């Protein structure tokens, strides 16, 4: 009975939105002004790319980004936002601009930005895999036994002050599939654009870390009932703690004493840390890996492909909009991620694309905006709307059509949030990703540059769209 009422409610709501859409509530965006805004956004991105390296704080070629706590938190400290250099932000700005350029190679002003950004992006690589943070001198001794080994460099934030030995060791994380897929996609795009040969990571690296027959299971995946073994790609490209016989009560016991060296969760000095000692399965990470492997022609024979698709289908069927990604608290990031993947898997994800479309139509506000959960940066309306608009445009381009008025309304809302200054036009960054698990709704990473690059790409796609 409850399911019937929910179906009727959604049907009535969807019909009412189509009625509203038949008479557009907003004026059609002016194409000339849109093109000017697009040009101004590229100008702002060029002006705000760093030209000089300053100690271990700012690096030439990067775009500013922040790491901040919503409120003070155990072991982490105060809520003040700090500038942070990380691979995932830089790679995603780079990749977005690369896609904008590849869609229109007359945009020559993008090429110098990519040229300056690429060497900096490579500083996050260990061979062909990438880390979220770059290697820097440790802020404090990482072991009670004495100074760290000569020349040892730890992965850590650039400016966020981690005060204790425990949290510094916890920040010295392993390389991961998310940064490795996006970092290597940047190398692939760089080769496409500049004609220079670049080595990229193979499918076998990701296939080496599949959620198969493991002696561990991440507690967050357990709580949220992610099927196992799912044979999807796991996040961390490193060995996890191995139990003789894993069970949830035993894992809880280890979590409760996470600060003791005997716990599976404890970060040991000079060992790249897999958070909580357990690898995890994240639907958005799986989208990013599939997207990389698809674009580089490696997905067909990948062992993790079927498991990744099954995971994506699972979270969409269960409508896990806000919890599909452990590290992505924004409700519309899964729509954005799957929409980018859809051109490569139209047959496999046909039903899921329709489900995304229906949710987007049902959840759009009358002013054109979309809202995330309250905990995610006070509903994060601008960032949510950018992700949702991108999803609509991507799906529309591939035949999952949307009413033009809906797309225009979202575009008008985004344009109403434009910030103009002497450098051009930009948009304030919302939650791009988070620290995951217990700090999923507390520790946020934001980037005006990433949000602005997505808006620029949205304008380009809108101007090229057929309705």
Image (cartoon, grey):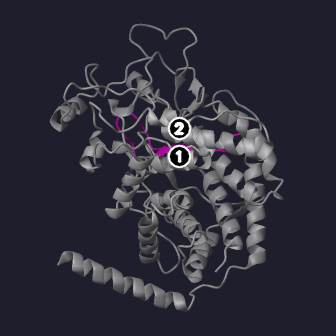
Q: Position of residue 203 (x, y in %)?
A: 53, 37
Whether residue 66 appears in magenta in the rendering, the answer is yes
Q: Position of residue 367 (x, y in %)?
A: 52, 79
Can you say which quadrant of the picture contains the C terminus? bottom right
The front one of 357 and 440 is 357
Quadrant of res 187: top right
Give left or right: position of 12 versus 184. left
The stretch in magenta equals 61-82
The front one of 76 and 204 is 204
| Secondary structure state at the residue bearing disc 1 | loop
Q: Position of residue 340 (x, y in %)?
A: 55, 58
Quadrant of res 272: top left
| Secondary structure state at the residue bearing disc 2 | helix
Find the residue positioned furthest to the front: 301
- What residue lies at 61% left-to-right and 49% top-to-bottom? 295
Magenta stretch: helix, strand or loop mostly: loop
Give left or right: position of 121 versus 294. right
- What residue lies at 55% left-to-right and 33% top-to-bottom? 133
Can you say which quadrant of the picture contains the N terminus? bottom left
Identify the residue under disc 2. 203
- What residue lies at 48% left-to-right and 49% top-to-bottom? 433
Identify the residue under disc 1. 299
- What residue lies at 24% left-to-right and 33% top-to-bottom? 255
What's the CA distance linking mark 2 and mark 1? Answer: 7 Å
Q: Position of residue 48 (x, y in %)?
A: 73, 48
Q: What crowding class fits label 1: few (fewer than 14 Cα within 10 Å), some (14-19), or many (20 or more)?
A: some
Q: What crowding class fits label 2: few (fewer than 14 Cα within 10 Å), some (14-19), or many (20 or more)?
A: many
User: Looking at the image, is mark 2 or mark 1 earlier in the sequence?
Assistant: 2
On screen, residue 239 above or below 440 = above
């Amino acid at each position: 009975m409850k399911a019937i009422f929910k179906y009727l409610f959604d049907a009535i709501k969807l019909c009412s939105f189509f009625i509203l859409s038949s008479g557009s509530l907003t004026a059609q965006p002016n194409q000339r002004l849109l093109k000017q805004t697009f040009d101004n956004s590229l100008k702002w991105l060029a002006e705000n790319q760093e030209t000089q390296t300053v100690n271990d704080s700012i690096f030439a070629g990067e775009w500013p980004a922040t790491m901040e706590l919503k409120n003070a938190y155990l072991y982490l400290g105060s809520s003040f936002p700090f500038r942070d250099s990380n691979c995932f932000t830089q790679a995603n700005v780079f990749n977005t601009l690369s896609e904008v350029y590849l869609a229109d190679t007359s945009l020559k002003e993008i090429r110098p930005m990519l040229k300056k950004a690429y060497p900096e992006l490579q500083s996050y690589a260990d061979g062909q895999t990438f880390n979220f943070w770059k290697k820097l001198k440790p802020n404090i001794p990482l072991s009670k036994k004495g100074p760290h080994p000569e020349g040892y460099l730890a992965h850590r934030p650039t400016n966020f002050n981690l005060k204790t030995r425990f949290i510094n060791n916890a920040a010295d994380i392993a390389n991961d599939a998310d940064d490795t897929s996006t970092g290597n996609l940047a190398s692939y795009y760089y080769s496409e654009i500049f004609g220079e040969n670049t080595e990229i990571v193979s499918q076998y690296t990701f296939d080496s870390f599949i959620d198969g027959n493991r002696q561990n299971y991440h507690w967050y995946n357990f709580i949220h009932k992610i099927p196992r073994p799912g044979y999807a790609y796991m996040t961390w490209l490193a060995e996890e703690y191995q139990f003789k016989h894993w069970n949830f009560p035993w894992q809880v016991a280890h979590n409760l004493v996470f600060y003791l060296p005997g716990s599976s969760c404890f970060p040991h000095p000079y060992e790249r840390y897999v958070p909580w000692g357990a690898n995890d399965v994240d639907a958005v990470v799986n989208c990013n890996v599939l997207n990389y492997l698809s674009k580089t022609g490696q997905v067909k024979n990948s062992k993790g492909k079927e498991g990744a698709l099954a995971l994506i289908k699972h979270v969409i069927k269960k409508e896990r909009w806000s919890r599909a990604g452990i590290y992505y608290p924004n409700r519309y990031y899964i729509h954005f991620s799957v929409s980018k993947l859809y051109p490569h898997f139209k047959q496999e994800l046909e039903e899921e694309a329709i489900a995304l479309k229906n949710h987007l139509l049902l959840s759009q506000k009358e002013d054109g905006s979309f809202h995330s959960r309250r905990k995610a940066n006070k509903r994060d309306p601008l960032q949510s709307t950018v992700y949702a608009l991108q999803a609509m445009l991507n799906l529309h381009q591939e035949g999952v059509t949307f009413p033009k008025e809906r797309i225009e309304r979202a575009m008008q809302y985004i344009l109403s949030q434009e910030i103009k200054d002497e450098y051009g036009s930009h948009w304030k960054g919302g939650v791009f990703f988070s620290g995951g698990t217990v700090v999923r709704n507390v520790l946020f990473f934001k980037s005006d540059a990433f949000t602005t690059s997505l808006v620029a790409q949205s304008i380009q796609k809108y101007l090229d769209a057929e309705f």
